[in-house]
Structures are given as C-alpha cells and as structure tokens.
Image (spheres, helix red, strand yellow):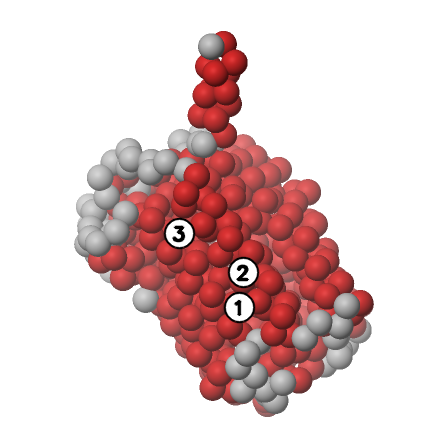
C-alpha cells in the first residue's frame, strides 16, 4: 500500500504542466532544426535557389505566423492543449515530407505546411506557459524551456552531421527521421498527460488593447530582427563563405550548446535585473553585431558573429515576461495570437523585399538590421522598472489612445 502511494506521488510529480512543456519543447527542434540545418544546402543543391527564391520561401514560411491570430477562433472548436498537440503533429509531418519534393514549388508547399504547425504550436506554447507558470518563476522556467530545446538541438545537429557526412544518407531520409521523432513524442504526450484546466477562462475573440502598445511594438521589431538573422545570416555563410552542411550543423551545434549552458541563467538574470535592463543590453549588442555583419570578410569572424547574434535570442524572454506582468490574465491566449501576428508582419514582407536588396548589396541588408536594433533600443527605454497593470510604460505618446 505504501509503495502504491509513493508510485502515485511520483507519477503525479512527473505528470505536471511544466514537464509537459519541457517534453513539447524537445519535440519542436527534432523537426524544425532538422529542416533548418539542411535548408540552405537543400535549396541551393537540389532546388537551384538564389537569394531571391530563398527570400520568397522565407516570406511564405512566415505567412502562418502572420495568421496566428486565427488561433483564438480555433479555440472555439478545440482546447488549447489539444491544439498544441495537433500543431506539433503537423510540424512533424511537414518536415518528413520536405525531402521528397526537391523543387521550387515543392519546397514552398512543404515549408508552408511545416510552418503552419510550428507557428501555431509556438503561439499556444506561449499562452500555456504564461497561464501555467506564476510570474515569479516564469523567467527561469522559460529559460529551462529554451535550454531543453537547445539540448535537443545539439542532439539533432550531431545526428545531421553524422547522417550526412559519415553515413551519407540522402536529404529525404534525414528529413523523415526528424519529422517522425516529433510525431512520436506528440503521440506519447497526448496519451500520457491529463488535460489541465485553465486557471482563467480565456477570451475567444480578438483582443487589442491600447495599453499593450509597447508590447506590440517590441514584438513587431523582434520579428523583423529575427528574420534578418534566420534568413540572411545563414545564407551568407553558405553563399559567401561556402559553408557545407557539416559546417552549418557545427555552427548550430555551438549555438545550441550556448543555450543549454546559459538559457536558464539568462532567465534568472532577467528575473533579477528586470525586463528594461535586459532588453537595453540585447539591443545595444545587436547594433554592433549587425553593423559588423555588413562588412565582415573573414569566415571565422563571420561564424563568431553568428554565434554571438544567436546568443542574444534568449533575452527575448524579457518581452514575454513584460507582457505577463502588465496583462489581464484572460487576455493571454488572444494576445499571444495577436502578438505572433504582429511579430510576423515584418517577417512576411522583409525576407522577399530584402532578398531583392541582397542581389544588389548584402551589406545593405545587415545595415537595415542595425537600424531596427536602434529603434528597438529606443522602445525598450520606455519600459518601467516595475511594469504592472496601470504602469505599462514610462511615457505614452500623444497619438496613443487612453489606456484601458
């Protein structure tokens, strides 16, 4: 009887919302990082992409993110937790199909399918995390989520390198393995974890509040900056410095290792220093990184910039926890979808537009990124030291509507 009670306690401790978040965080990079590690080489070697086509593909990839606001309408039909599982499964299936369609149109189609699952999962994951985790523990827990995803990324990048450089597997089989593992984890968590009730009933419609305007602005600029890194920093490595799949995988491996070692610590740092200081530090560093990208001519230095640039991503926790502190709890699911849409407005437009600019001047693309980092720095100066409902910003622009 005592053993049975102990077993139940251990199962209860294991089947917690935080554990579920960590397992799902591990499932995402199995597909997405497999897709990303192979993308530039697959696109150039098998589908004959140039900078223009890669820009169009990345714009198409961001369309599901732009439509993330539709999550609130799907919640009329299915619970958030179930929608997270469905999105993970779609991510895995889209990735598994990628290698079987080595053409421009084929890669466009599989990318949109993969991206649909990825972006809808990320939207729901943000919502569930902010609802399930209390404000005091949120920065560190979100750091742990990043660290678990990064550790999985290390495994994936190592396996991609092994499969491609040593086992000489074809692109299609590597894509299938990565996508299949994501689907497998999805089936496991769907059948193993209970359905957790929502602490606060979420609004099932679009929520736009003027008092969240700074969160919206920071989210928009974060999406713009992220696209320049994701799309063009990696493409620079392949096109200008001739990095092969093994070298790109090694870069990704180093980035993931940095996140495993420091993401949780960065979360704690955000919790201790506050969102304002964390974001000021991030954007000051990004101004220097993007400016250096524009003029770099040494492959080793470019790789170093790539690692430093990626290291700043963990500080984006501060935008999420800033919103958690100022938000009405019932707004979280809707605003997560709206925020993801705002994040992807620039993401839909910029890759295609800057892909054309890239054909004329790659340096100009990264100088645009420097300008965006400057604007983000100015916006982050408006975050109060102690954000809370009614204390969302230091200064409200005259054109802004009255807070509500």
Residue identified by numbered label 1: 96
Mark 2 crowdedness (10 Å alpha carbons): few <14, some 14-19, many ≥20: many
Q: Are marks 3 and 1 in contact (CB under 8 Å)?
A: no
Give whichever of discs 1 and 2 has the lower sequence position: 1
Closest to the observer, 219 or 52: 52
Point 37% across, 56% down: residue: 86
Is residue 287 in view?
A: no
Q: Which mark is residue 180?
A: 2
Residue at left offset 39%, top offset 51%? 85
Q: As displayed, is residue 178 above or below residue 267?
A: below
The mark lying in front, picked from 2 and 3, is 2
Residue 249, x across and y down, in percent = 71, 64
Instruction: Tell me what residue is drawn at x 52 percent, y 13 percent.
Output: 3
Residue 292 in sight in this render: yes
Q: Name the secondary structure under disc 2.
A: helix
Question: Which of 94/133 is in front?
Answer: 94
Of callouts 2 and 3, which one flags the residue occurring earlier in the amino acid sequence?
3
Q: What's the mark number on residue 85?
A: 3
**Quarter of the rendering containing residue 234:** bottom right
The picture quadrant where one finds residue 254 is bottom right
Residue placed most toward the observer, 300 or 4: 4
Q: CA distance from mark 2 to mark 3?
A: 14 Å
Give the residue furthest to the front: 1
Q: Residue 28: percent from the left, percent from the top?
A: 52, 55
């Amino acid at each position: 009887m005592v053993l049975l009670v102990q077993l139940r306690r251990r199962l209860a401790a294991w089947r917690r919302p935080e554990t579920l978040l960590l397992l799902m965080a591990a499932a995402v990079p199995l597909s997405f990082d497999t897709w990303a590690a192979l993308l530039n080489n697959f696109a150039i070697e098998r589908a004959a992409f140039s900078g223009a086509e890669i820009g169009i593909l990345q714009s198409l990839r961001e369309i599901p993110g732009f439509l993330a606001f539709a999550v609130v309408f799907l919640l009329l039909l299915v619970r958030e937790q179930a929608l997270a599982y469905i999105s993970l499964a779609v991510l895995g299936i889209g990735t598994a199909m990628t290698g079987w369609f080595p053409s421009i149109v084929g890669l466009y189609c599989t990318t949109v399918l993969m991206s649909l699952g990825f972006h809808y999962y990320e939207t729901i994951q943000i919502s569930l995390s902010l609802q399930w985790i209390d404000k005091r523990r949120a920065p560190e827990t979100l750091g742990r989520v990043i660290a678990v995803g990064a550790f999985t990324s290390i495994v994936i990048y190592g396996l991609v390198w092994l499969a491609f450089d040593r086992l000489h597997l074809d692109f299609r089989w590597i894509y299938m393995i990565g996508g299949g593992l994501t689907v497998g984890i999805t089936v496991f968590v769907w059948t193993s974890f209970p359905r957790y009730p929502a602490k606060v009933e979420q609004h099932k419609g679009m929520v736009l509040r003027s008092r969240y305007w700074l969160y919206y602005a920071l989210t928009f600029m974060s999406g713009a900056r992220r696209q320049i890194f994701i799309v063009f920093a990696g493409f620079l490595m392949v096109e200008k410095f001739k990095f092969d799949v093994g070298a790109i995988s090694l870069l990704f491996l180093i980035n993931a290792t940095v996140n495993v070692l420091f993401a949780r610590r960065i979360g704690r740092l955000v919790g201790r220093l506050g969102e304002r200081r964390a974001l000021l530090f991030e954007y000051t560093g990004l101004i220097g990184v993007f400016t250096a990208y524009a003029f770099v001519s040494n492959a080793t230095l470019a790789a170093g910039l790539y690692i430093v640039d990626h290291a700043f991503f963990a500080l984006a926790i501060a935008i999420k926890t800033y919103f958690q502190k100022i938000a009405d709890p019932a707004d979280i699911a809707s605003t997560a979808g709206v925020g993801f849409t705002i994040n992807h407005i620039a993401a839909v437009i910029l890759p295609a537009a800057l892909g054309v600019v890239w054909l004329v001047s790659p340096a100009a693309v990264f100088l645009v990124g420097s300008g965006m980092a400057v604007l983000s720095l100015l916006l982050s100066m408006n975050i109060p030291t102690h954000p809370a409902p009614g204390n969302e910003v230091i200064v409200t622009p005259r054109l802004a509507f009255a807070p509500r």
